[in-house]
Image (cartoon, rainbow, N blue to C red):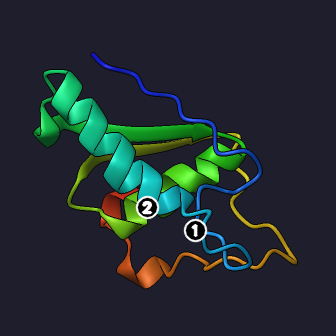
């Protein structure tokens, strides 16, 4: 089992609208994942994603972007909706049925 715990500050793990250089979702789904898969023996058919609080929102958001990639998604005390934030909301109609536990 490999556990990776990135810290994305107060980003909600989404790409920033106001600062295009802060592409947290891209970083986690592409750069970080590529690095981990090259460095360790990873079974890509058995990947999961989870997060606490803001990371719980991020876990569900990232899983909704690539539902075929993640076997499971978990949110622990997740901040699922934050009023007044400028981020792209999750379109639940496009989510994997297993993620629709909300």
Specify the label residue 26 is tagged with.
Answer: 2
Specify the label residue 15 is tagged with.
Answer: 1
Which residue occupies 33% across, 57% down?
A: 98
Disc 1 is placed on an element classified as loop
Circle 2 packing at 10 Å, graded few (<14), some (14-19), many (20+), is some
Residue 60 visible? The answer is: yes
Q: Is residue 76 above or below residue 85?
A: above
Closest to the observer, 46 or 34: 34
Specify the label residue 31 is tagged with.
Answer: none
* Circles 2, 1 touching at the beta carbon (< 8 Å): yes
Percent x, y of residue 101: 48, 57
Quadrant that contains the N terminus? top left
Residue 102 visible? The answer is: no
Q: Is residue 4 above or below residue 46?
A: above
Which residue occupies 12% across, 31% down?
A: 43
Q: Is residue 1 above or below residue 19?
A: above
């Amino acid at each position: 089992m490999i556990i990776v715990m990135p810290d994305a500050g107060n980003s909600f793990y989404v790409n920033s609208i106001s600062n295009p250089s802060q592409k947290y979702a891209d970083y986690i789904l592409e750069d970080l994942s590529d690095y981990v898969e090259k460095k360790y023996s990873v079974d890509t058919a058995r990947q999961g994603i989870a997060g606490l609080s803001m990371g719980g929102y991020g876990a569900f958001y990232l899983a909704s972007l690539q539902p075929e990639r993640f076997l499971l998604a978990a949110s622990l005390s997740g901040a699922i909706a934050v009023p007044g934030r400028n981020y792209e909301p999750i379109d639940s109609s496009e989510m994997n049925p297993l993620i629709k536990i909300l």
